[in-house]
Image (spheres, grey):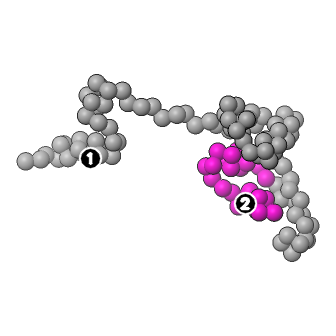
Amino acid sequence: MVTGKEMTIEQFITDTGLTTDQLLGVAPIEKAEVKYMYELGKPLVKPELLQSLPTQMYKFHQLYMEMSATGREMIGARIRDTDFLQGDDILWINFRGIYELYQLDALDVSIMSCWIL
């Protein structure tokens, strides 16, 4: 007969995907990689990945580095009347949103609008 405690342990094993050896401490448990966090003025990707960026992303990263060195936290993208038929305007994009795009974590509507333009 299976008790409630045994069911909890069985569920834990199923949820974690650990092997019996890992649970007993015989085999090592793999550690997750720590996420590279955003900090204004620091690279948008891990420094070792900079050289593998596509050309335009690398050039934009260089622009970001220059602008963030002066303390700027946003970049403006000019929108023409022909883009949205709302008159000329400037779309302000926060560098944190661009970081998320470089990390492929989340896409913001303003970032998508900028890339589409």
Mark toward the viewer: 1 or 2: 2
* Label ID, residue 112: 2
Majority secondary structure in the magenta region: helix
Q: Which residues are magenta?
A: 93-117
* Label ID, residue 52: none
- Residue 40, by quadrant, is top right
Compare residues 28 and 41 and report the one nearer the observer: 28
Quick check: marks 1 and 2 in contact, CB under 8 Å? no
Q: How many marks?
A: 2
90 in relation to 1, above or below: below
Q: Is residue 102 visible?
A: yes
Residue type at mark 2: give it: Met
- Residue 66, by quadrant, is top right
Residue type at mark 1: give it: Gln
Residue at 82 percent of width and 39 percent of height: 62
Residue at 73 percent of width and 48 percent of height: 98
Whichever of callouts 1 and 2 sits on the residue coming sooner in the sequence is: 1
Q: What is the residue that sits farthest to the top in this orientation?
A: 26
Element assignment for label 1: helix
- Residue 31, by quadrant, is top left
Residue at 74 percent of width and 45 percent of height: 54
Q: Position of residue 48 (x, y in %)?
A: 67, 31
Q: Please check the rendered image and state whether residue 110 is part of the magenta-colored stretch, yes or no.
A: yes
**Left or right of residue 3: residue 43:** right
Residue at 68 percent of width and 50 percent of height: 101
Q: Please check the rendered image and state whether residue 83 is part of the magenta-colored stretch, yes or no.
A: no
Q: Position of residue 51 (x, y in %)?
A: 73, 35
The residue at which mark 1 appears reads as 11
**Left or right of residue 101: residue 64:** right
Element assignment for label 2: helix
Q: Quadrant of the C terminus?
A: bottom right
